[in-house]
Amino acid sequence: MTAQAQEPPAAPVGRRRAPATRARHTLGRILAAVARSAAIFVPVFLVATFVTFALRSLSGLSPARIQLGEEATPEAVARVEAQWGLDRPFLVQYGDWINGVLHGQLGTSWTNGADISTLIGLGLGVSLSVATFALLIGVVVGFGLGTLAALRRTTWIDRAVTGFVTVISVMPAFVVGIILVAVFAVGLGLFPSAGYVKPDQGVGPWLAHITLPAVALSFDVIADVARQLRTSLIAAYRENYVVGALVRGLSPRRIFFTHVLRNGLGPALATLGLKFPALVGASVVTEWIFGLQGFGRFANDSAQAGDVPAVQGVLVVSIVLVVLFNLVVNLVLARVTPASQRGV
């Protein structure tokens, strides 16, 4: 009897095993999110690159026309195309290019013979700096406005936030950029009006050069995040679990952070999955206004010059950015929001 009375209970053993079970469950969610992203990435990548190659063949674009001009003889054109390997069958060219991409080689520019990976890397560093800062501004301000509007719903504060968000959502980034340059760069002299400085040359100058273009690009993010968060938080406040928490006497602060916010984050976070790649690739006009040689400007210049390998490289990088950032957003959703955890 004494020995039996000294035996430890079984419950603590189960509790000791709980962390391992949670870790396996978390790893399973991560692997599932990665598998879903891969299942989307592979067919999209293959179809997009194949269509690009097909359009190139149909367009009649050739490095010979770029290098020799429209008056080049057929013999000269054939000689240059043979040097670029364009005289081989289409599928062979596509296979060789895909093999190079998988090894990190995006090809050579038709216009200047430079390595496309290097050219894209130079512009991508600029665009990533501006887009990341713009996303940070959009998330902080958008979450603040959306939360304020939800907590003060149906009041004048809610109406003011909604009106402000509506106004900035219809303001084009290039218009905002021009106003920012006129006021803060030319008028007040607080920021440089153009140019870019790398972070290794000083964090202060780097932030000074990317602040105005980032603010110009952040308006759309602020508007979308604020609207999505306000709507989802108000919907979360109407759920039964919030009513139950009120009945149990939980404080408004605990109800908001423990129940409402975690369940209302999903739509706002999902919005960011599309915003970041768009900020990187769709900022051509903004880059022109602020004198930035970014990824979007490189893509535009390459398309206008008919530099097909460069355009194909831009396409590859864009697809990778979309997939990677959506993977990050899905992992955050699975970790933060209870509904996502249950759905995986």
Image: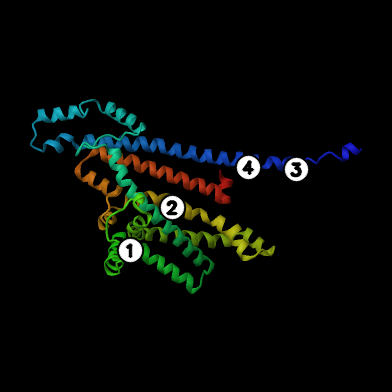
Q: In the rendered image, which quarter contains the C terminus?
A: top right
Q: Measured from the top left, where is residue 14 in percent x and y?
A: 73, 41
Up the image or down, 139 lies above or below 123; here it is below
Identify whether 205 is placed above or below 154.
Answer: above
Mark 4 residue crowding within 10 angstroms, few (<14) / some (14–19) / many (20+): few
Of the two numbered discs 1 and 2 on the same chain, state the one appearing first in sequence: 1
Residue contact at pointers 1 and 3, CB within 8 angstroms: no
Residue 115 vs residue 305, the one in the foreground: 115
Q: Nearer the viewer's eye, disc 3 or disc 4?
A: 3
Asked which secondary structure carries label 4, the reply is helix
The label shown at residue 22 is: 4
N-terminal label among 2 and 4: 4
Quick check: 33 left or right of 122? right
Q: Say whether disc 2 or disc 3 marks the residue closer to the N-terminus.
A: 3
Q: Looking at the picture, which amino acid does disc 2 mark?
A: Leu
Q: Which residue is mark 1?
A: 171
**Residue in front for this viewpoint, 284 or 160:** 284
Badge number at residue 272: 2
Image-based side of 317 in relation to 303, left or right: right
**Which element type, helix, strand or loop, lies under badge 3?**
helix
Mark 2 neighbour density, 10 Å: few (under 14) some (14–19) many (20 or more): many
Between marks 2 and 3 in the image, the one whose residue lies nearer the viewer = 3
* Residue carrying label 3: 12
Residue at the spot x=20%, y=41% of the render? 306
